[in-house]
Image (cartoon, rainbow, N blue to C red):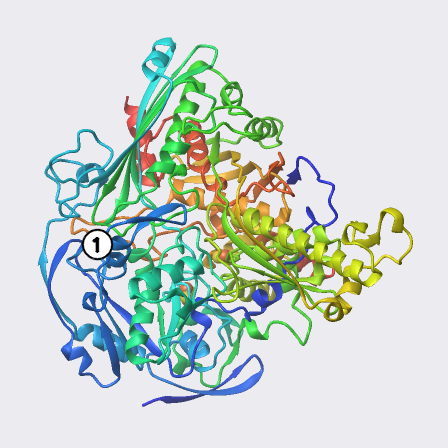
Amino acid sequence: MQERVKIPKFDVVGTRPVRPDGADKVTGRAKYGADHNVAGQLVGKVLRSPYPHARIKSIDTSAALALTGVKAVVTRDDFKDQSSEFVPAGEMLVNYRDVLRNVMAREKVLFEGHPVAAVAATSEAIARAALRAIKVEYEILPHVIDVVEAMKPDAPIVEDGMITVGVTPPPTKPSNVAKRVEFVLGDVEKGFKEADLVIEREFNTKPVHQGYIEPHACVGSVSEDGTAELWTTTQGHWIARAHCARLLGWDMTKLRVTSSEIGGGFGGKTVVYLEPLALALSAKTHRPVKMAMSREEVFKASGPTSGANVWVKMGVKKDGTITAGEAILKYQAGCFQGSPVQPGCMCAFAPYDLANVKVVGFDVLSNRPKVAAYRAPGGPISEYAVESVVDEIAEKLGMCPIELRLKNAAKEGTKAAYGPKFGPVGMVECLEAAKSSPHWNGPLGKNQGRGIAAGFWFNIGGETTVNLQLNEDGTLTLMAGTPDIGGLRASLAMMAAEELKIPYEKVRPIIGDTSTLGYNFVTGGSRSTFSSGLATVEAARSIIKQACGRAAKLWEIPEDAVTWDNGEIKPAGDNAGKFKPMKLSDIAKVAGKTGGSIVGVGAISAQGAAPSFGVHIADSEVDPDTGKLTITRYTVIQDAGIAIHPAYVEGQFQGGAAQGIGWALNEEYIYGADGKLQNAGFLDYRIPVASDLPMIETIIVEVPNPRHPYGVRGIGETAIVPPMAAINASAARATGVRMFELPLSPPKVLKAMKEAKKA
Amino acid sequence: MKHHVTTTINGDETEFLCDTEQTLLDCLRDELELTGTKEGCGSGDCGACSVLLDGRLVCSCLVLGVEVGGKKIDTIEGMATGDKLHPLQRKFLEHAALQCGICTPGVLVAAKSLLEKNPNPTETEVRYWLAGNLCRCTGYDKIIRAVMDAAAEMRGA
Ligand code: FES
Ligand code: FES
């Protein structure tokens, strides 16, 4: 059942047209990262560290360079070192010292898979031979993988000399804790005293990979005059340009970056891995260099998100009023600082209107790949822990988990622990929709349990540019710069059509490159439909204004005597009815004669992004013999603001839920004692397949965002937040035992059930 | 030394040269520029490289180029006829059954081979048949619906 709670009154917004890039994608015509070839291109390959932690004593590339067909090798010596400074990128801050070291190891290798050299050769086979011929001398160092281990005083230090930030007085001894953050509202001690019931629990989660099906791939081509082109699969080509230009010491204007069609990103393609290497190799050879990761490289050396240890304590009165919430989050950052622990802290209790909250977070290094953003980075982990405790509270109080949440739900005016007061938000509406949903009121079978959980994500705006050009025949070409991962072009064309009162098919949207369009921040933070939508509306309004000006010229009346009335340009006031109304297409025909081409630009820093709350209901069934959990029914309820293209909103809900189901049940990075990843492939890192899942029901709640002309909130990320807790709750009811660790894999579940039976 | 392979791709006789170790997927993509067939893993685990080999659904990353001499290969590029999309392609668009679309060619080729064998599959049959085609974006819901709907249309139901 697909259902919408509220129907908006627009002509185009809210309908379900076929996406403009659709035909190319069902026929194989669309060009993704690895689908682009340039005449004369070389094959680039990366030599990666076999060790999780080692000092690089020397790198000898002479034998590799001597091979016929090897055109260039780059190592740490080909990149100038960067100073340590933090600048914003995506939803996190980046430090170019670390970005550089992540792209190419310098003093040490810090995880298995860390790049130590890259080669360009005339064929794949020669490139591989060259990698084998490079001699690297390592001094192997002790490594640390687990986050709790990494925080111990005697743990091997990943980054020499790192002193924890955010602690007063600053520690004197280096550690793996990069940062401590704290968010406090009210007084938790007071809150716990008021409570009739206090529950305290500790949870563990494993790192999970974004799992995009398209591996990272790019082609870099540097001309003899130093200008360069980069084709890459990315969530942000302006960010890719900034990173590459910075690491290579180039002027930005010399580098033109084109984003290919992108085969999934989920946050993981907001960083650069291969791009600076391909460009550096091309700069040496002046031949185009194509690079692509294998799936093993994707697992070992890109993404994932943090694994974590989370402690939660909550106090509640008998009537269900939550009096205090406290949490300590320890997030793995991988080998460089910058885990999403801060957003994790901010999200932890965000679904609730609480007087007393304290959340402390630690950003912890270990010998793992540096984490990358993954859909609502940080939120799913902390909210899994908090929502699992909320569920246990409901059980202990004998209260319906929806009623308990309704009693404490965040609403308009609620002050979030992380600072702001919420505007209109849909948490209550989502809970009400859940309460009356067919799923919540449906039957359960044998060995089945039902769980529910809420989730929150901020959503962001940011720098965005859209160009809209009126063509001679009255059609429009729309150029946006936030890579379209799953229907953006459709939504933007819909908003332009709505605004300009023209048919959807008359607007052709494309994604521009870094040299043809103004700056665009990444597709991330659920911002692209929101921000590029705002910029589109602004560009469309500029077109209308210019068109009215042209009509004024033609009619020889003042500009303010011309109005735009539902798709028609009309003389107004004293002149009303004196001239025949014109359409945009009429103006387009005479644009040349009335002042030249009509182009609307929306160049904005989008403000007013609004959070999205969601509630998920999961039914799971346990096989008592094996401990295997199967999701038998699943419903996503989420506030979309207004759904521009409801089918793609549902798609985001369903996709987020499916990723969450994987996170809850199967997915995890498994390391051996040697610090090496043991499941770097889709066979052993098992993401949900079609036969694992039921249909995923959706209910789109629409509490419009007042700060967007079409009410958009941004919906891509919230959907991955509630699944782990909803499934955990359903598993507790199906098995009769509460579990505190992800994934809920069969051996763990079976063990927990056996232990519960013994007890 | 390269091998000379003669094969039929999407109905056209096609020749290419390949190294012994090159997979059919590499040959399609790198030698013939048929990049509609995608590589997601190179190890037979994702289905993005699905093609039909003499009518049988295979992962082209698990077949060597030298093996396909004299055989018939169908790829995504051959699925539409003239300006007419295959009903599956059309239904995928109508149902919004793709987000990023990287899995789509493989899913479509696999689904087409299912409907050739079983024009009236149950939801479970579709789910199990497509279990070798990973999609990270959609949660499969709309894919399954599109396949069922296309099957119904093709049956004339
Ligand atoms: S590329 Fe062949 S199965 Fe994944
Ligand atoms: S649509 Fe992206 S992997 Fe299927």
- Residue at 62 percent across and 36 percent down: it is A704
Is any part of residue B157 visible from this angle?
A: no
User: In the rendered view, does A718 fall on the left or right side of A710?
Assistant: left
- Residue A95: x %, y % from top left: 29, 51
Nearest the viewer among B109 and A351 is A351
Image-quadrant location for residue A47: bottom left
Q: Nearer the viewer, residue A587 or A343?
A: A587
Q: Disc 1: which chain?
A: A
Vertical order, B141 against A177 (above or below): below
Instruction: For residue A46, say whether it is visible.
Output: yes
User: Does residue A46 appear to the left or right of B63 in the view shown?
Assistant: left
Which residue is rendered at x = 46% and y = 68% of the image? B38
Secondary structure under the numbered disc 1 in the rendered image: loop
In the image, residue B150 lies at what x, y percent?
66, 59
Residue where numbered disc 1 is placed: A111
Q: Residues within 10 Å of mark 1 (few under 14, many from 20)?
A: many
